Image (spheres, grey):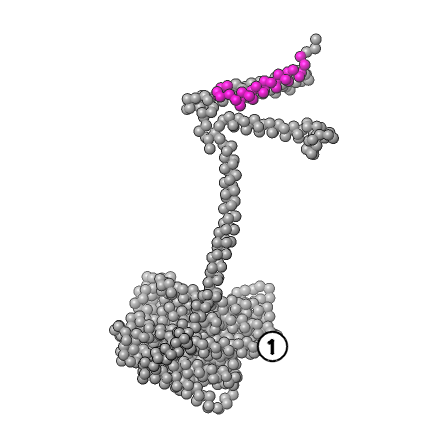
Amino acid sequence: MPGVPLSWYLMLSAVLFALGIAGFLLRRNIITVFMSIELMLNAVNLTFIAFAYQWKQVDGHIFSFFVMVVAAAEAAVGLAIILTVFKNRETLNIDDISSMKN
Amino acid sequence: MQLWLIPVFPLAGFLLNGILGRRFSKPVVNTIAIGSVLLSFAWVLKTLAALGDLNVAHTEQYFTWIQSGNLNVGFDFTVDRLTAVMLLVVTGVGSLIHIYSIGYMAHEGGYYRFFAYLNLFMFFMLTLVLAANYLVMFVGWEGVGLCSYLLIGFYFDKKFATDAGNKAFIVNRIGDFGFSLAMFLIVVNFGSLDFGVVFSSVAGHSEGALTAIAFLLLLGACGKSAQLPLYVWLPDAMAGPTPVSALIHAATMVTAGVYMIARSSAIYMRAPAAMEAVAIIGLATAFFAATIGLAQNDIKKVFAYSTVSQLGYMFLGAGVGAFSAGIYHLVTHAFFKALLFLGSGSVIHALSGEQDLRNMGGLRKKIPWTFWTMLCAAVAISGVPPFAGFYSKDAILAAADRHAPWMYWVGVITAGMTAFYVFRAIFLAFYGQYRGKGHPHESPFVMIGPLAVLAALSLAGGKLFNVPEFLAPLFPLAGETGDIGPVLVSVAFGLGGIALAWLFYVARPGLPDQIAASFGGLYRLIYNKYFVDEICDAVIVNPVVSGSREVLWKGVDAAVIDGAVNGIGNRARGIGGVLKLLQSGNIRSYAAWVLLGSVVLLFVMGVMGGLRRICSTSYSPFRWLAS
């Protein structure tokens, strides 16, 4: 039996990415928004690996490493920001942190 | 010969008094001011003595002022016989008036400022007189206009004084405009502004060009010398202190126009149309101003209109070709008109500021010195022989008679009116009963002294200084006809004017009011100066002012220019208001914008790259993107 077709991997990636976007736009909790961002990054990672396996090239893997590094750094900084915001605003609801309105 | 010292002495006086005068005591200010003018006068005498008979002009060149292409204008001074006459009048009469001012301005504020301005005026006037080309003369011309403005508006806290100063300067500017255009034409036609160059080459130019130049110079002279229609500033200029009226508006500044025409005689002799215009304007002004002077009640206004009238005589003399007669009258007029003004200043000083003739009277016994000196001036101006005015006025009238007899007759009638209104002023002020409320006291010697000197000059100056003879090398004397008739007629008119004034104001004091009542309309017309100022206001001033206000200020400046600039600002604010909505503070909308932006970016990158093939197929709707 042949391997899993490439298009299935790409489809899965697209679905995960779409779910990530939906969560990013629609969720109220800051931490959930961050999780959606991580989901998007992972979906992209999946795409890179799928293509790397397809064409037997190592570039996709290297790119994936870079994405993971960036994701980790961004998570660290982002969580620090969330902690500060929580300390000042006592809430994790992004709709309540709009003091820069107008 | 160091001609430059003549104007520089008063300039030094101006600088010293102007910059440091605030800290000087009155005697120091006096010494600097009077001293500088007396030094100038002494230097004039020394220069004239050293130069001999002045048949050849003596020129000194100081530095090149303008060097542009073919035009070369240097800062040069020149002295010939005409300059000599003017120098003596300006410095001599100027010194006397400076001395008089010590007494007159003793109680006024701004003492040092007054003398500083007076010295500045002397500097500019002497520059004007000594100039060897039109541009240097123009420097002096403008400068005396400036000093006139400063001195008329000397009491700057009074609106009528500052208004009068503005009026003088603005009307003068109209004349200066004519002078400037004349200078441009001279440069175009002659290639130089130097008197020597221009006057020696008049023969080679068309009469049309010369007439144009002459008319424009005449416009300049009308402005400076207060002829029709630019005379309106002179009566209002009486708002300044009386020594100013005497010096600037009687003896020196207003005569600059006559001097300029006499200097440019070479041009005028070849432009008969312009000369005729000069004569007619002069005659019309003389007659017109004399009629206004008949009914004025302010003593200074009477003499102001008299000045306008006498300047008309000088223009008449120049216009009929008797330039030396015009200058002769300039000299004698400086004597008796300065005396009349200084005398009225003495009267005003005696009455502590009263200027209305109706509130004077009977001052003959109270201020005798003033009375006798003014009487000398009055008989001089009326043309009574053998005093100064007779010789000069007669020279002009004789020349007018030779030119066109009707001019002689108008001139003679004007002479009669002159005698009438001057003696009207004398009789109203000095005879009869004192009608005022003050305590008249005689003026101090420092004021009486110059009056006495000027009185002596008014009486004897005509015979002593035979100006036409002195100027004969420049302006050839016309032959004497030996006809005594015209002379007798003019003397008769003069004496008749005096007699009529005696009748009206001493013998039958009620008569003038009766006549004024029966000729009501005519009297009102004359008394209100023919409403010239009101007409000027309505026809010229108000349209310009309201045009400026409505069209240029509100229409162009406020609506168009400000509107454009403010409009740009408002548009920027509007766009900013729209863009501000992006900054909602709402994290979710920021997230949405990020997403939208990244989608657009991806699409563009895709179009630039791989979508090319999609776009280039023949049935694709994206065909237009294929580049």
The quarter of the displayed image where residue B269 is located: bottom right
Q: Is residue B87 left or right of residue B429?
A: right
- Percent position of residue B519, x then y: 39, 78
Residue shown at the point (39%, 86%) measured from the top left: B496
- Percent position of residue B33, x then y: 36, 69
Parent chain of label 1: B
Q: Can you see residue B571?
A: yes
Assign a secondary structure to mark 1: helix
The three-letter amino acid code for the residue at tag 1 is: Ala
The quarter of the displayed image where residue A58 is located: top right
- Percent position of residue B246, x then y: 38, 73
Quadrant housing the C terminus of chain B: top right
Q: Residue furthest front?
A: B518
The quarter of the displayed image where residue B384 is located: bottom left
Nearer the observer, B352 or B578: B578
Residue shown at the point (29%, 78%) measured from the top left: B361
> Does the magenta-highlighted stretch encompass residue B491?
no
Mark 1 nearby-residue class (10 Å; few <14, some 14–19, many ≥20): few
- The image shows a total of numbered marks equal to 1
The secondary structure that dominates the magenta segment is: helix
Residue B47 vertical placement versus A50 (above, below) = below
Q: Which residues are magenta?
A: A4-32
Residue shown at the point (64%, 16%) measured from the top left: A9
Residue A66 vertical placement versus B626 (above, below) = above
